[in-house]
Amino acid sequence: MSGGTDGYVLRASGIGVGFGGVRALAGVDLGVRAGEVCGLIGPNGAGKTTLFDVLSGIRRPDRGRVLLDAADITRRSPVWRARHGMRRTFQRQQLFGQLSVADNVLVAQEWRGGGGGPAADLLALPARRARERARRERAGRVLADCGIGALGSSYAGGLPVGQARMVELARAVADPPRVLLLDEPASGTSAPEREQLAGVVRRLAAEEGCAVLLVEHDVAFVMDLCTRVVVLDLGSVLAEGAPAEVRADRRVRDAYLGPA
């Protein structure tokens, strides 16, 4: 697949979501281009996670469309979107605590495995072993890129928050994504872990052409990492632009950032 005619790999168009009488999203338009790192910020309750749920297929909007390469995927499942290159992390950790760190990352590549029953398994054994080696080598490289290469044999359930966040990132990028949705990836991380995280994201965008959209409350982290920032407030886009433009916007300061 290639980007749509408007240059966006992923686009939300006129997204509206309501919960009873509460308007969570009110006609949100947002797009992310290949190789771009876009930040999504705003006060609590602005609708950021709801928008992520819509983009990743967990929630269907009341109105509007989600487009991947200009194709309407609004009704496609999260599994379909994952198979077509969309990855997401969550605010709450979603690791398999009883598995090792390496196995948590390997899980993300399992969809490439074959099937066909015992006879097919026997005939395909050499190829299957080669694929398994390749997956493990890929997992090792990704863990090293995320600064946690030494943790491969550790149980994921015993990790501190910052390291667990890095495992989630490694799992999300183990199979190179075309679109990466990061929901508060820096929450609970140390300064070195945030630096490592930013490096991985920058490389994905620059070298793999990945379209990255991240929600994060660490405004300094967002402004340093992202090439463009979108601000949500009360379910609508309040401002959009380069980090310096958004930081200087009086409406954004009043609603979220506070005095300069």
Image (cartoon, grey):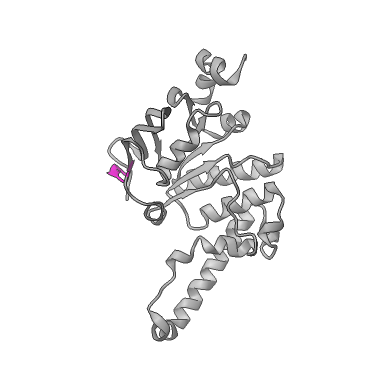
* Residue 209 located left or right of residue 156: left
Q: In this picture, is 134 found above or below 117?
A: above
Q: Residue at x 70, y 63 (%)?
A: 154
* Residue 211 located left or right of residue 185: left
Image location (x, y in percent) of residue 123: 41, 85
Tally the numbered discs.
0
Q: Quadrant of residue 21?
A: top left
Q: In this picture, is 49 found above or below 180?
A: above
| Residue 171 in sight | yes
Q: Residue at x 57, y 43 (%)?
A: 91
Image location (x, y in percent) of residue 14: 33, 31
**Image quadrant containing the C terminus:** top right
Q: Nearer the viewer, residue 56 or 148?
A: 56
* Residue 146 located left or right of residue 173: right
Q: Residue at x 55, y 64 (%)?
A: 106
Outermost residue on the front side: it is 20
Residue 122 in magenta stretch = no
| Residue 36 in sight | no
Q: Which residues are magenta?
A: 67-74
Image location (x, y in percent) of residue 245: 50, 20
* Residue 30 located left or right of residue 110: left
Q: In this picture, is 85 found above or below 12?
A: below
Q: Nearer the viewer, residue 239 or 95?
A: 95
Q: Residue at x 68, y 44 (%)?
A: 193
Image location (x, y in percent) of residue 59: 40, 43
Q: Nearer the viewer, residue 97 or 195?
A: 97
